[in-house]
Image (cartoon, grey):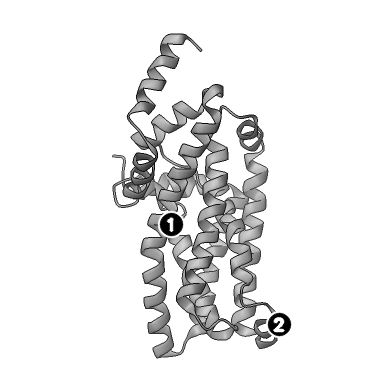
Amino acid sequence: MESGHHHEIVNLISNVGFSEAFFGAFSSFFSSWQFCIAQISPFFMVFLIAVCLIKEVGSLKQPTTNLLITSFGYLVGFSIIFALLGASGTGISGYLLYHIKSFRMLSGIFILLIALLMIAIAFVRNIAQTLPGSIFWILAPFVGASFAFIYSPCIPPTLSQLLNYASVPENAVRGFLFLIIYGIGLSTAFIAIGLPLAIAVGWLTQRIRRHGLVIFCCAFFLMILGIMAMSGFMVYYKAFLLSFFVE
């Protein structure tokens, strides 16, 4: 890389700190970039709603605590994989991107299995009683990682600067940290909307007593995500979403 170009990248990143990386990601969720983020954001919402409702048929009695711990696990898994994929100055990024189709296939299979587990917990009482109440605390980081593999992000200005910075080998560690913070910011926006939504839907579902049906609907939408990831159809879904954003 030419020294002039490297100097330009350093100057660009000098205007972006960790707080800017966080809020740049967080605010993108509430902007027109949501049309791209919607590749995964609705599916996170239904995942969290299902987790909230499953506590009614499982052993957990603290829905808010359950949702917070599950959300934190998702945040960790998503942010780490998102950063590894974006930090092209590291060898790990190249390996992951080279095998991205395989990782997306595995992620799709995993999400399908999560959806089937949700349906089983909702309708088979013995399974609900056998599994530990914290099962989704354990699975949440892997769900987050799967979403990160499936997600094909658009590049808002803040993310563009971070990716350019992280592409320089000598910036690999700091660039990786910047991208983790960006992933945390994006996940926090998901949680800020998803958590109260899940609680509200849980309250409403408790009133109408249709836990199984709502969990099944959530699982069905997760199955759609899994199938799109496995079949490569996600690219068409992304194009459909962007058609509302790009004229």
Residue 236 rendering spot, x and y as whole percentages: 48, 46
Please state which amino acid type lies under the numbered disc 1.
Ser
Q: Which residue is mark 1?
A: 41
Q: Of the residues tagged 1 and 2, which is closer to the observer?
A: 2
Residue 130: numbered disc? 2
227 displayed left or right of 65: right
> Height in image: 176 above or below 204?
above
- Residue 109, horizontal then vertical, whole percent: 66, 57
Residue 153 appears left or right of 122: left
Distance between the Cα atoms at labels 1 and 2?
Answer: 31 Å
The image quadrant of residue 98 is top right
Q: Residues within 10 Å of mark 2 (few under 14, many from 20)?
A: few
Q: Which residue is depicted at the point 49% across and 32% down?
A: 175
- The image position of residue 237, as x and y in percent, is 46, 50
Q: Can residue 233 be seen in this snapshot?
A: no
Residue drawn at the location 36% of the way across and 37% of the way down: 156
Q: Residue at x 54, y 76 (%)?
A: 216
Amino acid under disc 2: Thr
Q: Residue at x 38, y 27 (%)?
A: 13
